[in-house]
Amino acid sequence: MTEFEPAGFMRRFLAVLVDTVMFFLFITVPVTLTMGSVLIASSGEVNWLNVTLGYILPFVLTIWFWQKYLGTPGKMLLGIQVVDFNTGAKPSVTKSVVRYFAYIISIVPLFLGFIWIIFDKNKRGFHDYLSGTAVIRNMPEYVRK
């Protein structure tokens, strides 16, 4: 993908920080204030509202943002986009879902999958390779077609 400028580690890291703060302010705080806890289970019973708000909602929102805007609010604010590595176009829903869950593989070995971005020539992490995506500096739509 030589015709696109990959987004570097720091820009991507800052985008994740913005998204984390937004998630905390708009999901964790309201749930805690209204329900008293963000725990998934209490007293041995699963709290489905917390599961929905804490896990399902972030998943759905993330995939929706990637499909609609090529990035989460943090990525949009930092001027970067998630694209299909081979075409530079919007990633398929399948690639987006794989990318979302591949974050686990990037996190588990001491965040090595994210640190890899620093050293990779295309600035891709493990989750990017597994899903066939890349994060690039914003490109106009007509250039990506």
Image (cartoon, rainbow, N blue to C red):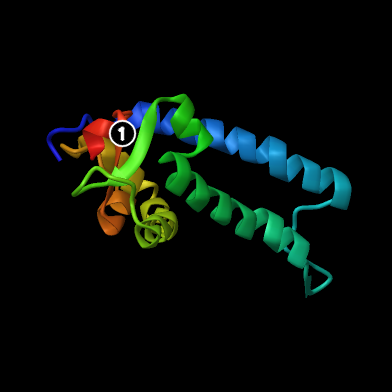
Instruction: Name the quadrant of the N terminus.
Output: top left
Which quadrant would residue 28 be assigned to in this image? top right
Q: Amino acid at mark 1?
A: Glu
Place of residue 128 in the rendered image (x, y in percent of width and height, measured from the top left): 30, 50
Name the residue: 71% across, 44% down.
Answer: 27
Q: Position of residue 113 (x, y in %)?
A: 32, 48
Residue 40 image position (x, y, % from top left)? 72, 63
* Quarter occupied by residue 44: bottom right
- Name the quarter where the C terminus is drawn: top left
Residue at label 1?
A: 141
**Residue name at image x 67 percent, y 39 percent:** 24
104 shown above or below 33: below
In this rendering, the count of numbered labels is 1
Q: Residue furthest bottom?
A: 44
At a point 24% along the width and 42% down the height, the residue shown is: 88
The percent coordinates of residue 112 (x first, y second) are 33, 47
Q: Residue lying furthest left in this view?
A: 2
Instruction: Mark 1: give few (<14), some (14-19) or many (20+) Cα within 10 Å.
Output: few
Which quadrant of the figure has residue 118?
Answer: top left
In the rendered view, would you say 113 is above or below 71?
below
Q: Is residue 14 left or right of residue 113?
A: right
The residue positioned 81% from the left and 46% from the top of the image is 32
Looking at the image, which is closer to me, 130 or 97? 97
Q: Of helix, strand and loop, which one carries label 1?
A: helix
